[in-house]
Amino acid sequence: MKASIFFFIILLSSNALGDFSRGHTYEVYQERDLVEQRKAYKNAISLLRNSQFANFSKEKNDVVLCSDGEDALDLIKHEMPDLVILDWMLPNLSGVEILRQIRASKNLKKIPIIMLTARTEESDKLRAFDTGADDYITKPFSNSELIARTKALLRRVSEDSFTDTLNFHDIELNRDNKRVFRGKKEIKLGPVEFKLLEVFLMRPGQVFNREQLLDKVWGNQIYVEERTVDVHVGRLRRALNRGKVKKDPIRTVRSAGYSLNENYS
């Protein structure tokens, strides 16, 4: 599975990062700074895309750029990234406000966040850490330091978050012995259905579209049609719902995908 690292920065000018960027750009630096800033960001993005991080494959990482605070927050809510690298001074919604909203969200609060900003005052650093930043890097920044800190944070989060057992109401999945229970009844699942359920249980509030499930369950090394996702979600549902059960724990979100049903009981 690829790491999904979402890298939020204020882009430098209309052509500052060329094909690297998606969305609007804002000219916020003096012209004399553009060349060096542009080079630094391009190098950092290239390194982030091609570095190997803990528990992820050697394939290229997904690095998505966003230059607007409100757009960035919407993207985070929809994509649920593995890591956010966040500038403080974003238009429409500041980086520290994005940080505050992420930490206040039930579904987003565990996402690791690195602040990458020109604000060097100790009071700014303390405010960022008090709001929930995991790390703080000031500009101008070293690419090697950025990659080292990113690797260290992903490794630490991975070690802290891994547990043998995942639970959701009366559903329990044991990663160690590959067993699943609903209440006291053991549920027999195939390997694909087991992985699907594991993905859902790791982020109970997230809606996964078919493309995301294909990437997380099958990876991108083999071609699998999107309809295959529906087939295996159907098999998972039938297995979980055998016998006398009150409610389906898997929710279909029309035109969006699947998630665990937060109102399930």
Image (cartoon, rainbow, N blue to C red):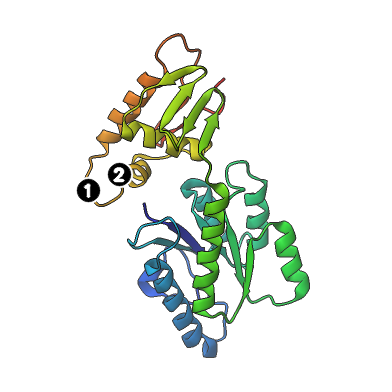
- Residue at left 38%, top 23%? 237
At mark 2, the secondary structure is helix
- 237 relative to 41, above or below: above
> Could you tell me residue 264's position as x and y percent?
54, 22
User: Is residue 8 visible to the viewer in this orientation of the structure?
Assistant: no
**The image quarter in which residue 86 lies:** bottom right
Q: Amino acid at mark 1?
A: Ile
Residue holding disc 2: 218
Please give the label number shown on residue 46.
none
Q: Is residue 111 found left or right of 4 in the rendered image?
A: right
x 43%, y 55%: residue: 55
In percent of the image, x 75 and y 64: which residue is there?
A: 127
| Crowdedness near tag 2: few (<14), some (14–19) or many (≥20) residues, C-alpha within 10 Å | some
Marks 2/1: CA distance? 7 Å
Q: Residues within 10 Å of mark 1 (few under 14, many from 20)?
A: few
Residues at marks 2 and 1 touching, judged by CB atoms closer than 8 Å: yes
Report the residue that reaches farthest toward the top.
244
Q: Which residue is mark 1?
A: 222
Q: Quadrant of residue 217?
A: top left
Judged from this view, the residue extending furthest toward the front is 177
The one nearer the camera, 104 or 75, is 104
Amino acid on which the number 2 mark rests in the picture: Trp
